[in-house]
Image (spheres, rainbow, N blue to C red):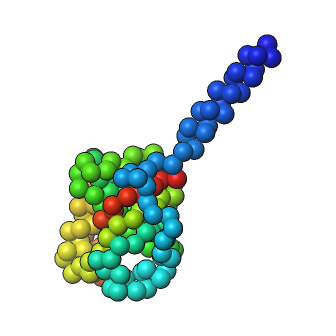
Amino acid sequence: MLIRTMLGLLAIVCTASAFAQPMEFAGGADKTNVIDASTLLAKASQYHQTQVTVKGVVTKVCKKRGCWMTLEVEKGEQITVKVRDGDMVFPMSAIGKTALATGKFEVFQLSLEKSRRYLAHKAEENGEAFDPQTLKNPITVYRLKPSAVTIL
C-alpha cells in the first residue's frame, strides 16, 4: 500500500513538473535584455525596426494557425507577436500565461479606415463580432516579428 501511494505521488510530481516546463520556440527568448514595456511604448517610434525582448501576458492566440498571439504588456496596451504561417505555432493553451518574445519591433499608425479594416479582420479571425462604425479614432498597432519566443 505504501509503495502504491509513493508511486502515485511520484507520478503526480513528474506530471506537474512536465507541465511547468516553459515552451520555447527557436531556442527561446533572450531573457537577459527584456525592455520595460512603458519605456518601449513611450518611445515606440525610436524603437521601430529594432531588436527587443518584450514580456507580457498572452490574451489571444490565432485560432486558425497559431501564427500570432497578443501580449498585454501594460495597462491594457498590447503588442501582437506575429510570424509567417508555420514558422512557429503558438498553442491556444498559452492564453493566460506569461510570454517573452525577442524580435523586430514595428509600429504602424493606421488611418481610421485602415483601423476599422484591421480590427474587423482580427474579429473575424477570432469569431468575434465587430461593428467598424463604432470605432471613431485611428489606432496604432504595435507588432513584434519574433526570432525566438518563450512561453512560461
Q: Name the image quarter holding residue 2.
A: top right
Can you give x and y, in whole percent of width and height, for residue 102 in the image? 39, 65
In the shown orientation, is residue 98 left or right of residue 139?
A: right
- Note whether residue 39 is visible: yes
Q: State the quadrant of the N terminus.
A: top right
Please determine whether, in this image, residue 88 is positioned above or below residue 145.
above
Q: Nearer the viewer, residue 116 or 34?
A: 34
At x 24%, y 68%, the residue is: 118
At x 42%, y 81%, the residue is: 41
Can you give x and y, in whole percent of width and height, for residue 81 in the image? 35, 62
Q: Nearer the viewer, residue 68 or 23?
A: 23
- Note whether residue 139 is visible: no
Can you give x and y, in whole percent of width and height, for residue 105 in the image? 33, 73
Q: Name the image quarter holding residue 53.
A: bottom left
At x 19%, y 76%, the residue is: 113
Please determine whether, in this image, residue 66 is positioned above or below residue 59.
above
Please determine whether, in this image, residue 51 is positioned above or below residue 42.
above
Please determine whether, in this image, residue 81 is positioned above or below residue 87.
below
Q: How many marks?
A: 0
In the shown orientation, is residue 116 left or right of residue 7?
A: left
At x 35%, y 81%, the residue is: 47
